[in-house]
Image (cartoon, rainbow, N blue to C red):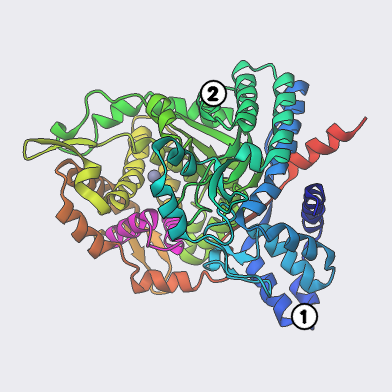
Amino acid sequence: MGRIVVTLALASALAGVACRREPPPAAQTQTDPMVQQLRSMTARFAPVDLTADISSLPANERQALAKLIEAAKAFDSLFLRQVWAGNEPLLLTLVRDSSDLGRARLHYFLINKGPWSRIDDNEAFVPGAPPKPPQGSFYPPDSTKNEIESWIGTLPATERNRATGFFTTIRRGPDRRLMAVPYSIEYQPEVGRVAALLREAAGLTAQPTLKRFLDARADALLSNDYYASDVAWMELDASLEPTIGPYEVYEDEWFNYKAAFEAFITVRDDAESAKLARFGSELQEIEINLPIDPKYRNPKLGAMAPIRVVNTVFSSGDANRGVQTAAFNLPNDERVIQEKGSKRVMLKNNQDAKFRMVLQPIAKVALASADQAAVSFDAFFTHILMHELMHGLGPHNITVGGRSTTVRQELKETYSAIEEAKADVSGLFALQFLVDRGKLDQALSQTMYTTYLASMFRSIRFGINEAHGRGVAMQLNYFLDNGGVTVASDGTFAVNQQRIRQNVIDLTRDLMTLQAVGGYTDATQMIQRLAVVRPQVEAVLDRLKDVPVDIEPRFVTAEQLEAKEEEP
Ligand code: ZN
């Protein structure tokens, strides 16, 4: 099977699905129940046009951007192959099936990058598909987890590092012995093509840090040594902000060793970047005004981890499957993190699309009608920015019984939920503080609490088994117990403006004080008591069944850009 064929099949499949919106329900008089079922599964991802403003980019930068999109496309088929060796042949079969059922399967396959529904515990939706292989195609198909584990145990240090590294697959040699194969060899044709396109983009851009990153990443794809290019990515300071390469290890469910290919081709959001810089200069002032005992405040905050706000023009591979990424932290290489730290990239237009397609419909169901109008994207996104910054404030290095330690060490498994709740609620505190000091518009205090109330339902809906959901459930129950949030007799929720501010101050104090003293027992009790879904909340979640879970983006700006570049 030719790989070019698969790339073309994928391209035409994507185009076909993008152009073809499903017929409205009224037209479905006698639809096959299987088609019906697939369509309702697919409808949980609301189709949305994703756009980014590239009007201020000079022609050469736009050409560079078009090259980056072209490069990113190669990662869709590579990622398919990494998920399962059978993915590409199955895609070719699905593309050839023009029946309604075939189209419906293809559409959902493309959303999931495979025949398993990622938000339904990877349940297969194409007949004959095996269960999703937890090891992807990173290890030999006839190997077992035990075999790989004991083989790795026999290796000397250097070879073991290679075998457990991000950028190798494990294969059998002719003698059936296991060996590590670098991605630069395993995926040679594709990574070679991507490297060439990155070099072309590097030749087009006039921005030195971008040029350096693109050249370094092209080298990395061919040499399999990503270190220098990760460093260059940390130093990137340009209007185009591409993240392209093998990064996250979630598809390797055996060991989380192997990185999957992905690309986020994005452009910097200058207005939000300016807002971030402004907030950055207020952080020390916020810290010394935190509602905690002054002895727990930090008189001199350290350097802030870099944050970029960008808009997605195109994404591919691991960056475009199932639920869409709203923000990410990279790189994952510990050596780079030690030396340069890591960078948080926030995808503003993805968040805006999620806000419109998911959060607003949730607000219509969950909130009292008077409150619905107060839900605003500006409040939503500004709070997310402040949440990220607040992770850097409050207690981190603490003293417990004369011993120097950290909040993370003392709070153990309760740490993440407490820390996420802290960042959320102290984010509200910080925004109110800036409003009161005249640094932010007064209107924000009329929208941010209600917007946050709606967004709490969105988080809890994703489940309270992970830190974010737990932290949010704790806050919502705290507000309910202390009057900041009320429930009407019709089951809708509302913010009580008279109480919410004091609730936010009190909960910020409780959480940060608990962190400052390393109160593990208190944290455990607080989670047991508050990180639960109470019947009133459950009733709202039940009424959210028809609200989309997430979005299915169509990359309109990328399509327009490509159409332009193809003109003679
Ligand atoms: Zn967080």
Q: What numbered label is drawn on residue 449? A: none
Q: Position of residue 394 (x, y in %)?
A: 25, 36
Q: Does the magenta stretch include residue 459?
A: yes
Assess disc 2: are there few (<14), some (14-19) or many (≥20) residues with their C-alpha within 10 Å of its C-alpha: some
Q: Position of residue 315 (x, y in %)?
A: 65, 43
Can you identify the residue that label 2 sits on?
A: 232
**From which residue to which does the magenta span run?**
453-480
Marks 2 and 1: which is nearer the front?
A: 2
Mark closest to the chain's N terminus, 2 or 1: 1
* Viewer-closest of 115 and 222: 222
The image quadrant where one finds ligand 1 is top left
Q: Is mark 1 on a helix, strand or loop?
A: loop
In the image: residue 109, left or right of residue 135: right
In the image: residue 322, left or right of residue 528: right
Contact between marks 2 and 1 (CB within 8 A): the answer is no
Could you tell me which quadrant the C terminus lies in? Answer: top right
Q: Is residue 510 visible?
A: no
Q: How far apart are marks 2 and 1 (CA)?
A: 53 Å
Could you tell me which quadrant the N terminus lies in? Answer: bottom right
Q: Which residue lies furthest to the bottom in this view?
A: 30
- The kind of residue on which mark 1 rests is Thr
Can you identify the residue that label 1 sits on?
A: 31
Residue under the point 46% across and 58% down: 147
Q: What element carries label 2?
A: helix
* Viewer-closest of 205 and 326: 205
Q: Is residue 153 visible?
A: yes
In the image: residue 362, left or right of residue 265: left
